[in-house]
Image: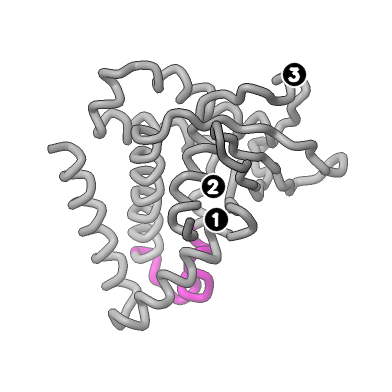
Amino acid sequence: MNVRRYTLLGFFAALLALMPLTRIMAAELSAPQLAIESASIKLQHKMQDKTFIKDFANVNKFVNEAILPHTDFDKISALVLGKLWNSATPDEQLRFKKEFQTLLVRTYSRAFVEFKDWSIRFLPLEMEEGATKAVVKTEVLQPGLQPVAVHYRMLLADGEWKAYDIMIEGVSLITNYRTTFSTEVQTKGSLSAVIDGLAKRNIEALAAKSS
């Protein structure tokens, strides 16, 4: 299974999956873990609605609303672009964040519709008292397959824990997409051209799913 496949399945399983068959009870989960669990609970109930999952536009909208409070898209966007973020104009930064968020949400949404038998198991959290950063470690479970390690890098900001990177079997979302976009900028000649291409792909993908 390649990195992109891990990204698709892992993100779905960890953020959007059914509640796990075996896990630490909710009362025993820490604040960073509860932030991850919160999105899962919201989506668990919607998963049961067969009519709902047939309407991709509604699925996409709901997924966005469910994960937005628990995901720091500002930080993710800046880290994904790396040095390119610092040299980008404010308009380019805003456009990239919007289109990259759309890319991730529609990826989650597609997986949300296609994969239904995943569950997650929270592993013990190692975090010092008063810490503002944490790595929430989970295992993605699927009947008949080996567990997949999915770890979240999280940051406490304004009293809320939010994910800003996800590592699937040790492979970072940030690193993976940074390489992808860096290569595209070199190929297309500018960040603006890359954003235009991403926006076009988003429109086409969403239109295809809605038809």
Question: Which mark is drawn over residue 44?
Answer: none
Count neighbours of disc 3 (C-alpha within 10 A) and say few if under 14, some if 14 to 19, many if 20 or more. Answer: few
Q: Circle 3 sits on which residue?
A: 27
Q: Vertical placement of 183 versus 74: above or below?
A: below
**Amino acid at pointer 1:** Lys
Q: For the residues carrying marks 2 and 3, which lies nearer the camera in this image?
A: 3
- The residues colored magenta run 77-91
**SS state under label 1:** helix
Query: Marks 1 and 3, Cα distance to the nearest angstrom?
Result: 29 Å
State yes or no: discs 2 and 3 in contact (Cβ < 8 Å): no
Query: Marks 2 and 1, Cα distance to the nearest angstrom?
Result: 6 Å
Residue 7, percent across and down? 48, 52
Residue 88, magenta (yes or no): yes
**Amino acid at pointer 2:** Asp
Q: Circle 1 sits on which residue?
A: 75
* Residue at the image point whose x is 22% and y is 49% from the top: 205
Question: Which mark is drawn over residue 72?
Answer: 2
State yes or no: discs 2 and 1 in contact (Cβ < 8 Å): yes
Count neighbours of disc 2 (C-alpha within 10 A) and say few if under 14, some if 14 to 19, many if 20 or more. Answer: some
Q: Vertical placement of 183 versus 98: above or below?
A: below
Left or right of 63: which side holds 164?
A: right
Q: How is the image coloured?
A: one colour
Closer-to-camera residue (38/4): 4
